[in-house]
Image (cartoon, rainbow, N blue to C red):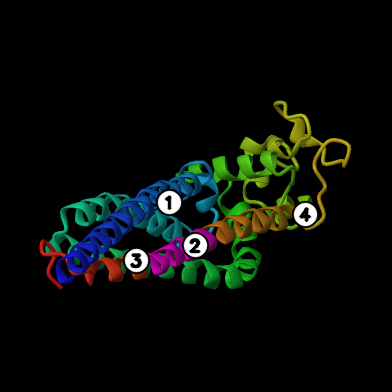
Amino acid sequence: MGAPATAYDEKKETCGTVCLKYLLFTFNFLFWVAGGVVMAVGSWTLVEKSDYISLLSSATYAASAYILILAGAIVMVTGVLGCCATFKEQRRLLRVYFVLLLCIFLLEILAGVLAYIYYQQLNEELKQNLRETMVQKYRQPEQEHITKAVDKLQQEFKCCGSNSSSDWGDSVWTRTSEADGRLVPDSCCKTQTLGCGHRDHPSNIYKVEGGCITKLENFILDHLKIIGAVGVGIACVQVSKKKPFHCLQHIDNPRWPP
C-alpha cells in the first residue's frame, strides 16, 4: 500500500511543479511585454515631446522618463532570465533574477516618487521660469532649441505668451531689428504666415486665458500621471510574482534542492 501512495505523491508534486512552471512562464512573458510598454512610455516622453523639456528649469521630468527607459530595459532582460530560471531550475539564475527584480522595483518606485514630487512643484516652477525663458531667450544667439520649443508650444497648444500675449511686450526679441516691428512671434497667429505677428488683435492671434503656462502644465501633469501609474503598476506586478516563485522554490524536486 505504501508504494502506490508514494507514486501518487510524486505524480502530484510533478504536476504541481509543471503547473507552476507554466504559470511563471506566463508571468514572465507578461512581465517582458510590460517592460516594452515601460520603455515605450519613457521613449515617447523624451522623443515625441523633447522640445518642451528645454523650457523647464528642473531636470526631474526628464529624469523620470530616463529612469522608466532604464527600468523597462532591465524588465525585458529579467523576463527572459526568469523564463530560463524557471525551466532550467538553476539557483544562480534565480538569485540574479531576484536581484534584478529588486533593482527594477527600486527604479520604478524612484520614478513614481520623482513624478509625484514634480507634480506638486510644477505649477510654481512654470510661473517662475517659463515667462523669463520666453522673453529673455527667444530668438537669441545659441538659443535655437528654446526658439523652436516656444514656436512649437504656441502652435500646438494654440496659445501666445506665458501668461498672455502681452508678455511679448517685454521680450528682448521684439526690441531688435530682427523682429521688424512684430508685436508677437508669427507662431502666435491662428494662420501662420511670414510677418503675421505685426497684429496682436484677437482675430489674428491666440488669446487664451492663462496663456501657454496653463496648457503646458496640463500637458506635463498628464504625462507625470502616466509615468507614475506605469512605475507603480509594474511594481505591483512584481509583488504579485513573488508568491508563485516562493512556492516553486520549496517543491520537493530532486533537481532543485531547497
* Magenta span: chief secondary structure: helix
The residue that label 4 is drawn on is 164
Numbered disc 4: secondary structure:
loop
User: Which quarter of the rendered picture does the N terminus lie within?
Assistant: bottom left
**Picture layout, residue 55 above or below residue 101:** above
Q: Quadrant for residue 105, please give it.
A: bottom left
Q: Earlier in the sequence, mark 1 or mark 4?
A: 1
Residue visible at 26% across and 66% down?
248
Confirm or deny contact between disc 3 and disc 2 (CB under 8 A): no
The residue that label 1 is drawn on is 34
Count of residue discs: 4
On screen, residue 193 versus residue 135, left or right, reads right
Q: Give the percent coordinates (x, y) of residue 150.
A: 61, 45
Instruction: Specify whether residue 231 is painted magenta.
Output: yes
Q: CA distance from mark 2 to mark 1?
A: 9 Å
User: Which quarter of the rendered picture does the C terminus lie within?
Assistant: bottom left
Residue visible at 65% across and 67% down?
123
Magenta part of the chain: 229-241
Confirm or deny contact between disc 2 and disc 1 (CB under 8 A): yes
The residue that label 3 is drawn on is 244
